[in-house]
Image (tube, grey):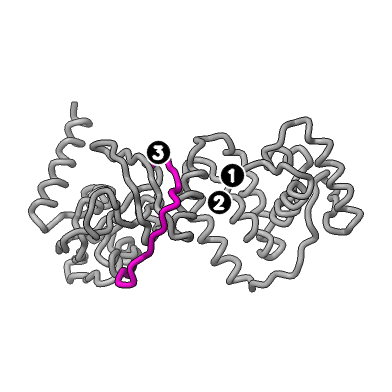
Amino acid sequence: MSAPETKAQRVRAVLGLLQRAECTPRELTGRLGLPDHKLRSIQRDLEELIDSGEVERLDNGRYRCPVKATPLNSVEALAVYSAARMLYHHAADYNEHYLNALEKLTVQLPAAARRVAEQANQAYHQRRGVGGGGSRTFELVARAWLEGRVLKFQYHSLQKVSTVELVIYFIELNPQNRQAYAIGVNRLKGGDRPFVFRLARMREVTLLNDECVIPEAFHPLEYLSGAWGIMTGDPVRVELFFNPAVRERIQETHLGPGAECVTLSSGHTRVCLQVGGWKELVPWILGWGGEVEVVGPPSLRAHVAEAHQRAAGVYSA
């Protein structure tokens, strides 16, 4: 977020922040990216805004815009706020855009919930300075998608670093690891098959002027229908056998559309999943420890068995 250069830009930015959160003059200076010597200018802006009735000073020394009537009912506001909190949880680094979204939604919560949400927002604001490139990357990815432009970046996968010029079809959060991914076609690679790219692995991100379009034939939910998380591939049938001790827990777990979950007379639970490749399933399966047995496919069973054997070796050494 670039610092405002003129007084008019500064006043608009101050109002924008105070519509979302309570701030002191010094906090406003920092949030707007202004140097310390601009503190006095911010204080003068606040006095003028108080005189015009657009801002009020609170007893705790903070300032805010008067709270207006909420356009959402309580349940709607909570649902949207919860979605924004999911963005918060997915990012280990501070992201200015996430904080802005949380603050905009917080003012629409009922008073009792708003106070707690404001405390959570303030705690998130303390992350400022952690990481560095997350907000900028997310901003450029969003602009590329919404403006129909090509995004260029260096992609640091686990195997190599490659140059990508991406036509973004969709942006999705992985429900398993809560990371953000861009789905689209790398025009440098050729072909029209979409791939997924984790935002956290993008470096040297730039927004090109080249325009692009999302094919009408692309349906994101169909593309992701076989994914356990975000990765797609040839469909594989996975069969799991859970011990009776975890029957209630597995029944409470969201297993995705098409999953079969049957409690047997022995008390065991048989779960069958159809997924686009089983690699993303492995951490989830290992998380159940000895409470689950992989029945099939054989390749997944062997992989999980080997992982357990390595773990056992660590503790028996």
Helix, strand or loop under label 3: strand
The segment highlighted magenta reads 202-220
Dot 1, crowdedness within 10 Å: few (<14), some or many (≥20)? some
Disc assigned to residue 98: 2
> Mark 2 and mark 1: span between their CA atoms?
9 Å
Q: Label 3 belongs to which residue?
A: 203
Mark 2 touches mark 1? (CB < 8 Å)? yes
Q: Residue at left 51%, top 44%?
A: 136
Please tell me how crowded label 3 is: few (under 14), some (14-19), or many (20+) other residues with Cα within 10 Å.
some
Mark 3, mark 2: which one is toward the viewer? 3
- The tag earlier along the polypeptide, 3 or 1, is 1
Residue 285 x, y percent position in the rendering: 24, 52
Read off the residue under disc 1.
Answer: 124
Where in the figure is residue 144, as x and y percent of width and height? 45, 54
Q: Is residue 154 left or right of residue 138?
A: left
Picture disc at residue 192: none
